[in-house]
Image: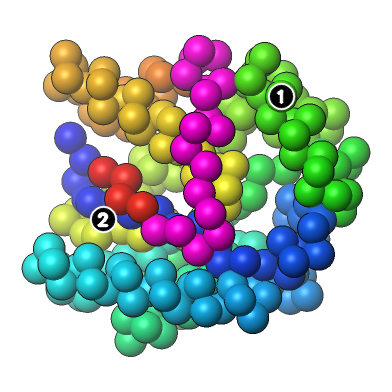
């Protein structure tokens, strides 16, 4: 059982999305020239309005919201827009940047290359999610830091509505683990973050593309 309720939001359409390039390193990802494109700002605003509606439907006060977000420019920008819709400050106590929520680093071979290269990475993931692209992160590397992020959030907050503002691949991987953990929990009353850790298997992680999100897409997680 988790201490909090969770929703995930993929960042709005970014300038790299517009340009059709891969920006996955921390060094490049935090640069302001790689924040949201104008369409992405609109998507983030709509996502914030949708999240606010969800809060109202579930009788959750905004005071109980916590926004946890990746340090990349496109996710910071998204989180800032959503926070403004909720009348929150991104620099306030209800918002937290978390390095473990950063984009998956695809390695120097793919950095700043065409989005078309994603197909190569995902084909590799399906064959072996423990095999790293040269100099980059494999699916399991990302899974490990997402489990840590979830554990840290669970330790810090209790009874909150957590919005995780993150990236396509990490959110696919997180959803894959959570869905597998939900099934495991049916026969196991143990700690949910420990169950998340236990489902980091090749059979499960290789399926992460099933949970792809569009830019600016909001989903309920737990």
- The residue labelled by disc 2 is 157
Quadrant for the C terminus, please. top left
Quarter location, residue 88: bottom left
Q: Please, is residue 86 above or below residue 4 in the view?
A: below
Q: Position of residue 207 (x, y in %)?
A: 52, 24
Asked if the stretch drawn in magenta spans residue 202, the answer is: yes
Asked if the stretch drawn in magenta spans residue 73, the answer is: no
The reply, left or right, for residue 215 in relation to residue 106 is left
Asked which secondary structure carries label 2, the reply is loop
- The residue labelled by disc 1 is 123
Q: Please, is residue 141 above or below residue 71 in the view?
A: above
Magenta residues span 201-218
Q: Position of residue 216 (x, y in %)?
A: 50, 63
The reply, left or right, for residue 91 in relation to residue 134 is left
Quadrant for the N terminus, please. top left
Quarter location, residue 29: bottom right
Identify the residue shown where x is 56% and y is 78%.
Answer: 41
Identify the residue shown where x is 61% and y is 76%.
Answer: 39
Q: Please, is residue 207 above or below residue 103 in the view?
A: above
Q: Please, is residue 46 above or below residue 169 in the view?
A: below
Near-viewer residue (197 or 44): 44
Quarter location, residue 7: bottom left
Which is nearer the N-term, disc 2 or disc 1? 1
Residue 92 seen anywhere in this rendered image of the structure: no
Identify the residue shown where x is 22% and y is 50%.
Answer: 4
The reply, left or right, for residue 112 in relation to residue 175 is right
Near-viewer residue (86 or 220): 220
Disc 2 to disc 1, how far (Cα)?
37 Å
Q: Disc 2 or disc 1, which is closer to the eye?
A: 1
Residue 131 seen anywhere in this rendered image of the structure: yes
């Amino acid at each position: 059982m988790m201490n909090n309720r969770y929703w995930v939001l993929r960042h709005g359409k970014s300038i790299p999305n517009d340009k059709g390039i891969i920006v996955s390193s921390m060094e490049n990802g935090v640069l302001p020239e790689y924040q949201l494109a104008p369409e992405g700002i609109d998507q983030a605003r709509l996502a914030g309005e949708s999240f606010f509606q969800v809060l109202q439907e579930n009788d959750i006060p905004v005071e109980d919201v916590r926004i946890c977000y990746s340090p990349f420019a496109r996710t910071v920008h998204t989180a800032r827009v959503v926070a403004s819709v909720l009348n929150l400050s991104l620099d306030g106590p209800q918002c937290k940047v978390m390095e473990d929520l950063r984009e998956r680093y695809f390695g120097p071979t793919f950095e700043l290359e065409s989005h078309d290269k994603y197909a190569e990475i995902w084909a590799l993931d399906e064959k072996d999610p423990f095999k790293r692209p040269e100099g980059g992160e494999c699916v399991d590397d990302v899974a490990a830091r997402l489990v840590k992020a979830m554990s840290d959030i669970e330790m810090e907050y209790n009874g909150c509505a957590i919005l995780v503002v993150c990236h396509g691949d990490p959110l696919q991987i997180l959803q894959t683990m959570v869905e597998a953990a939900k099934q495991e929990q049916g026969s196991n009353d143990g700690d949910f973050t420990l169950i998340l850790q236990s489902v980091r298997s090749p059979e499960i992680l290789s399926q992460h593309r099933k949970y792809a999100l569009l830019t600016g897409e909001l989903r309920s997680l737990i």
